């Protein structure tokens, strides 16, 4: 699928360094649109990460960093990007925030695109401060997620960073959780709220389209709502999708296939818990060795890649809905 | 107004330690429903905070902490609460996050209610982690702000903390910024999106109503939209309002009066820039002395209290709109 279609990448403009182009190029190079989610829940971290080589007990944040490094080492050559859910780092205080930054830097050092799942959203003067924190400064990633509830001026500083500094954003459109319909599915002027948001996200990204055909202003669309995913793909033809919900939240390769375009491009699919807990699925406990942990994680990442690939190919063959 | 109506507080239930009761009691005791906003922009911090007693240059985060302490010292006996906009601390990295915690603790030590303006919102397993970070753990405040875009399950863990641990939340309903209408004012089933959110916020807080008549599940409603404020007050009779937008964002005491109930209760009004930059309004520059800075800040806090009091009294006399 994607690797075979690497020629699509030839049209990438070399003149501007846009996030969208770097992302799509990386996806093409790896032949894999999946993202390693790094959402470290302490209770899921195997014992082997909790002590250092000298037998000293690591702090929770140190264990998190070791755990993340092992996961990155296991799959860095397979995946184009990592996504860090910042809540799990904030829960560990300053040490956790340091582990967040160190993980971002470690992943970037392996050539991976880094996405901070921070879902910020505030008035414009505050948005400037969040931009300083999460796109330019101490916690800087290549891209972050944003919440659209406050409207355009809350997103504007980040759009400027997409245009001028090669950064990316993914704005929540239709989320993967059970209650996402509470407000997102309210019907206004004959269309769901999430469709209104989708149209705005599409519009906001118009001036930041790369040679790859996609904008640096992306959308978060949950894989757990495959029909909505298909509709939104057609409404936002130039918007890259960040798709959560695969694996532990219940969505399959067939479900996520709806996020991709006719060329099998345009989306990245996140899995956090499924890769992180592959040792549990394999029947092991938290006493798993580091070597075993890495082997299971790598195998699960390969399975995910193949599963998504199959889903996309099935859809490309059927041409259904395009 | 409020102090004179302190007898309303006699009905506070002593059986449960609810945030709403503590907040309303504190407002009554101080006779002042205004909140000191601590949103430290480096460029607004006077020179006197940038060096310590030995002439050593402070780091930005250290200067922020000193600045915050001076503001708290200036007004702690006048105001019931402080609100920290976390973006300005995140922008300073780990040191900033430490200053956030230290400021929260300093304010709590002065008997002030602490509100973390974090506007988080995520799927429920992630919401648990945010709850651990911002209500229970390292960055814990008495209350935080939340974004409703993901619906009920994203708010549920925080509601549990309101019920069981005496915490409070303020959910964004109608925000104060220019673009707030982009989505919040979409009309669904004959009502604005923000009205739908308001009804849900009201419903979610039903089981957590204190003796004061208000719930620990509050709403953020911008003072810059006074008509909406009045409408929302009637739709959410038991929901305490956190009202941003006073001062630098343009709203007056008359505007914010619409947030209060017939007894002049039920809302807290935030001002960040107006108090913080009172030395600039007084014609001073960043070379202002600490003593002068404190005097101007205190005077501005008193002016704000009087301005809001006048607005409320005018409205109580007119009885208009109740």
Image (cartoon, coloured by chain):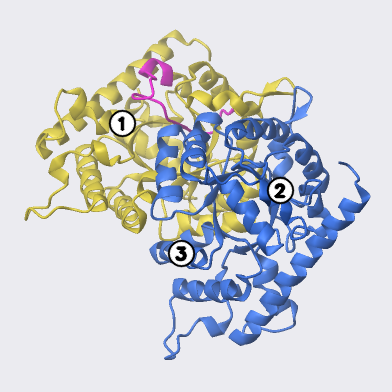
Chain colours: A blue, B yellow
Q: CA distance from mark 2 to mark 3?
A: 25 Å
Task: Look at the image and tell me in which quarter the C terminus of chain A lies.
Answer: top right
* Residue A46 image point, x, y percent: 59, 80
Q: Seen in the image, is A276 located left or right of residue B317?
A: right
Q: How many marks?
A: 3
Of residue A199 and residue B88, the one placed in the foreground of this image is A199
Disc 2, SS: loop
Q: Pointer 2: what residue? A: A266
Judged from this view, the residue extending furthest toward the left is: B54
Magenta highlight: main SS: loop
- Please tell me how crowded label 2 is: few (under 14), some (14-19), or many (20+) other residues with Cα within 10 Å: many
Q: Chain of mark 1?
A: B
Q: Disc number at residue B273? A: 1
Query: Is label 2 in contact with label 1 (beta carbons under 8 Å)?
Result: no
The answer to whether residue B67 is magenta is: no
* Residue A277 image point, x, y percent: 67, 73
* Residue B215 image point, x, y percent: 53, 39
Q: Seen in the image, is B202 located left or right of residue B51?
A: right
> Reading the chain from its start, which is encountered first: label 2 or label 3?
3
Q: Seen in the image, is A126 located left or right of residue A68?
A: left
Residue at x 57% of width, y 68% of height: A41
Q: Pointer 3: what residue? A: A105
Of residue A264 and residue A202, the one placed in the foreground of this image is A264
- Residue A270 visible in the current orientation: no
Q: Marks 2 and 3: which is nearer the front?
A: 2
Q: Marks 3 and 1: which is nearer the front?
A: 3
Let me know if marks 3 and 1 both belong to one chain: no
Residue at x 63% of width, y 80% of height: A294
Q: Disc number at residue B160? A: none
Q: Which residues are magenta?
A: B236-256
Q: Name above or below for residue A117 compared with residue B278.
A: below
Q: CA distance from mark 3 to mark 1?
A: 35 Å
């Amino acid at each position: 699928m994607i690797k075979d279609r690497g020629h699509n990448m030839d049209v990438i403009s070399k003149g501007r360094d846009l996030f969208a182009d770097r992302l799509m190029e990386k996806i093409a190079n790896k032949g894999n649109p999946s993202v390693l989610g790094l959402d470290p829940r302490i209770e899921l971290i195997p014992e082997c990460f909790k002590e250092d080589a000298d037998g000293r007990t690591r702090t929770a944040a140190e264990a998190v960093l070791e755990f993340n490094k092992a996961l990155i080492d296991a799959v860095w050559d397979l995946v184009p990007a990592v996504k860090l859910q910042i809540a799990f780092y904030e829960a560990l205080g300053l040490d956790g925030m340091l582990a967040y930054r160190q993980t971002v830097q470690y992943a970037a050092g392996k050539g991976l695109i880094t996405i901070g799942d921070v879902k910020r959203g505030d008035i414009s003067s505050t948005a400037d401060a969040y931009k300083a924190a999460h796109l330019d400064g101490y916690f800087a990633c290549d891209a972050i997620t944003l919440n659209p509830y406050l409207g355009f001026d809350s997103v504007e500083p980040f759009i400027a960073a997409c245009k001028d500094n090669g950064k990316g954003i993914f704005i929540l459109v239709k989320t993967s959780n059970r209650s996402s319909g509470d407000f997102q599915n309210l019907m206004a002027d004959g269309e769901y709220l999430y469709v209104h948001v989708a149209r705005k996200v599409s519009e906001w990204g118009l001036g930041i389209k790369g040679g790859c055909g996609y904008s640096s202003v992306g959308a978060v669309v949950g894989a757990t709502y495959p029909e909505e995913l298909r509709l939104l793909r057609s409404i936002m033809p130039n918007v890259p999708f960040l798709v959560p919900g695969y694996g532990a939240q219940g969505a399959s390769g067939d479900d996520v296939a709806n996020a991709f375009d006719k060329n099998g491009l345009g989306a990245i699919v996140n899995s956090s818990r499924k890769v992180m807990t592959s040792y549990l699925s394999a029947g092991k406990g938290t006493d798993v060795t580091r070597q075993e942990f890495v082997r299971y994680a790598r195998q699960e990442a390969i399975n995910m890649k193949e599963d998504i690939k199959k889903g996309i190919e099935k859809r490309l063959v059927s041409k259904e809905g395009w």
